[in-house]
Amino acid sequence: MIAINTLTSAAVPLPRPNVDTDQIIPKQFLKRIERTGYGEFLFYDWSRIQEGPDAGQPDPAFILNNSAYKGAQILIASKNFGCGSSREHAAWALTDYGFLVVIAPSFADIFFSNAGKNGMVLVRLPEADVELLTARSTQNPAHKITISLEAQTVTDEAGFSATFDIDPFRKYCLLNGLDDIGLTLRHAAALDKFESAHDKEFWLTPRPANA
């Protein structure tokens, strides 16, 4: 997992409320057994032409197909982002595409947890602030936003400044690039010691004759 502290990037505006996890990554792509490779299917039903002779081709009207936003690492969403099913694939698709931060007025609880465990910073801001940043990024695709996780601030080149709340434990994990596996591996020495003692007690010690 990538450690995140300060990130400055252009932002992709997606002003659609109640974006659910099936819209983020449709169910037909959940058969994959890896955690990577989902980025190309992000918002698939919106990013592809659905009918006619060009069905399946990129839809030039969808924001992610606008080359001006290529490489943006921030997504600006609307309220209740990530609602619907609990699929962790939604977080995988966003991070695999390249998004490290999502700004929105509110998030679905399970998605919020999944995204944090997969290295994304989710920033809750008042709806008016989100609408302002959405408008600025829509008018100017090169508009840069800076997220400081350490300071818990959001700023931009036009003088915008706001603070956001984040759980201290999740903040620690994101700052240090620790997912659940990384947290466990911090105790690798103690785990090895326990396993060694366990093996000696239960596997390597000769059994009593009457066992």
Image (cartoon, rainbow, N blue to C red):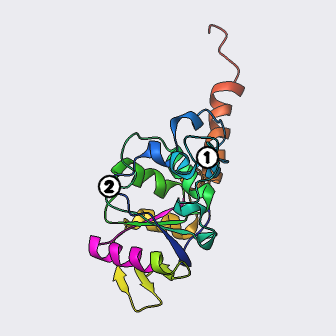
Secondary-structure class at tag 2: loop
Residue 149 seen? no
Residue shown at the point (35%, 73%) measured from the top left? 130
Pick the front one: 125 or 57: 57
Of badges 2 and 1, nearer the viewer stands 2
Which x, y percent locates residue 82?
A: 40, 51
Residue at 67% of width from left, 47% of height from top?
37
Q: Is residue 60 visible?
A: yes
Q: Which mark identifies residue 141?
A: none
Magenta-colored stretch includes residue 44 = no
Horizontal and vertical percent position of residue 93: 57, 51
Describe the element under mark 1 as helix, strand or loop: helix
Depth check: 208 or 133 in front?
Answer: 133
Q: Amino acid at mark 2?
A: Asn
User: Alpha-carbon neighbours of circle 1 within 10 Å: few (<14), some, or many (≥20)?
Assistant: few
Vertical order, 172 against 37 (above or below): below
Specify the farthest residue to the top.
210
Q: Which residue is mark 1?
A: 191
Give the residue number, with chain letter if any, for mark 2: 80
Residue at image location 68% in from the left, 39% down from the top: 196
Span of residues in magenta: 119-136
Task: Say which quadrant the N terminus sits in.
Answer: bottom right
Above or below residue 73? Residue 36 is above
